[in-house]
Image (cartoon, rainbow, N blue to C red):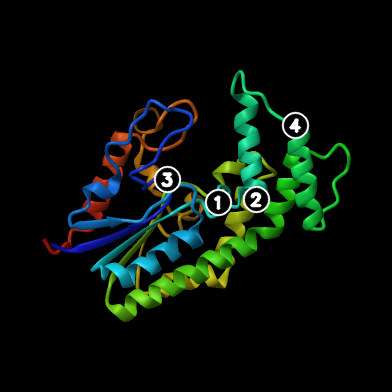
């Protein structure tokens, strides 16, 4: 039976626990439907570079025949160093603002925000809020996010090619979904992606890029496109696939790639 290595974030994590739906129990993830002996190193809250690096570390440990990368949304919005990550701060604030009976320490939040801004040489006015700061951060750092992810992907494409490992890469959901309403940040990201030589060069690598360029506006698609939001996604704003959604993603992948060595 073929050995398959899967690396991704919470959309692929069999141990995912929903904070917004604590009663939900994860019983099935899409990697469970892959036709082979699967090793899943996915973990919640990972950015793309870490997803790739986890796979690279596991390739030499597990010697897989096939690697499947399920990329996140490019934004690093929920990484372990969250206290130094403005996108995570924005995400937390947005959620807390709309959850009833949640005591929010606005003074502590503003202190953290101004400390972070100072370290990044960003001057905040008294009336500046998290939205203005995150908008500034995103616009200045999107090129870095794009280049870092592209370089990581080029690295694993090269290594898998050298080791003769089949490699599939797709993106789970649309980029910058955590910053939908901040000055069209997604459009800025899309413009950066399609104008990046690093990103465009990925297509010439020896890997199956499912849905490339992963932008609907450029004719691409993500795994999320396979799902019906009402039927396949957890409720209460959680945004993760339920069991039905995971089954659809797994069936979609198996239908796309039928060359498994069973």
Report if the CB atoms under discs 1 and 2 are less than 8 Å apart: yes
Image side of residue 60 versus residue 88, left or right: left
Secondary structure under tag 4 reads helix
Outermost residue on the left side: it is: 262
CA distance for labels 1 and 3: 12 Å
Say whether disc 4 or disc 2 marks the residue closer to the N-terminus: 2
Secondary structure under tag 3 reads loop
Image side of residue 152 versus residue 252, left or right: right
Please give the name of the residue rendered at 39% of the width and 27% of the height, measured from the top-left corner.
230
Front residue (pair 211, 151): 151
Say whether disc 4 or disc 3 marks the residue closer to the N-terminus: 3
Say whether disc 1 or disc 4 marks the residue closer to the N-terminus: 1
Q: Circle 3 is placed at which residue position?
A: 10
Which dot marks residue 106? Answer: 4
Q: Circle 1 is placed at which residue position?
A: 79
Mark 1 neighbour class, 10 Å CA radius: few under 14, some 14 to 19, many 20 or more: some
Q: Circle 2 is placed at which residue position?
A: 85
Mark 3 neighbour class, 10 Å CA radius: few under 14, some 14 to 19, many 20 or more: some
Please give the name of the residue rendered at 49% of the width and 69% of the height, measured from the top-left corner.
152
Image coords of residue 20 (percent x, y): 48, 29
Say whether disc 3 or disc 2 marks the residue closer to the N-terminus: 3
Image coords of residue 128 (percent x, y): 82, 40
Report if the CB atoms under discs 1 and 3 are less than 8 Å apart: no
Report if the CB atoms under discs 1 and 4 are less than 8 Å apart: no
Res 69 → quadrant = bottom left
CA distance for labels 1 and 2: 8 Å
Outermost residue on the bottom side: it is: 162
Say whether disc 1 or disc 2 marks the residue closer to the N-terminus: 1
Where is the N terminus found, in terms of image quarters?
bottom left
Query: Vertical placement of 214 versus 104: above or below?
Result: below
CA distance for labels 4 and 3: 28 Å
């Amino acid at each position: 039976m073929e050995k398959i290595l899967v690396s991704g974030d919470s959309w692929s994590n069999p141990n995912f626990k929903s904070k917004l739906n604590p009663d939900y129990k994860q019983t099935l993830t899409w990697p469970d439907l892959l036709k082979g002996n699967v090793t899943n190193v996915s973990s919640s809250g990972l950015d793309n570079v870490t997803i790739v690096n986890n796979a690279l570390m596991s390739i030499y440990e597990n010697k897989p025949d096939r690697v499947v990368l399920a990329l996140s949304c490019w934004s690093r919005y929920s990484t372990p160093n969250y206290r130094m990550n403005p996108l995570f701060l924005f995400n937390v604030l947005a959620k807390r603002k709309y959850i009833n009976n949640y005591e929010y320490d606005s003074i502590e939040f503003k202190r953290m925000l101004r400390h972070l801004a100072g370290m990044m040489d960003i001057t905040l006015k008294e009336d500046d809020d998290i939205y203005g700061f995150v908008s500034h951060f995103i616009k200045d750092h999107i090129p870095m996010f794009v280049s870092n992810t592209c370089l990581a992907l080029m690295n694993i494409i090269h290594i898998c090619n050298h080791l003769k490992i089949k490699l599939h890469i797709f993106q789970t959901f649309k980029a910058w979904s955590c910053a939908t309403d901040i000055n069209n940040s997604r459009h800025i990201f899309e413009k950066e992606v399609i104008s990046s030589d690093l990103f465009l060069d990925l297509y010439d690598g020896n890997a199956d890029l499912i849905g490339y360029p992963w932008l609907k506006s450029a004719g691409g698609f993500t795994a999320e496109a396979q799902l019906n939001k009402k039927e396949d996604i957890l409720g209460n704003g959680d945004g993760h696939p339920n069991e039905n959604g995971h089954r659809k993603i797994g069936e979609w992948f198996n239908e796309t790639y039928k060359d498994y060595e069973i």
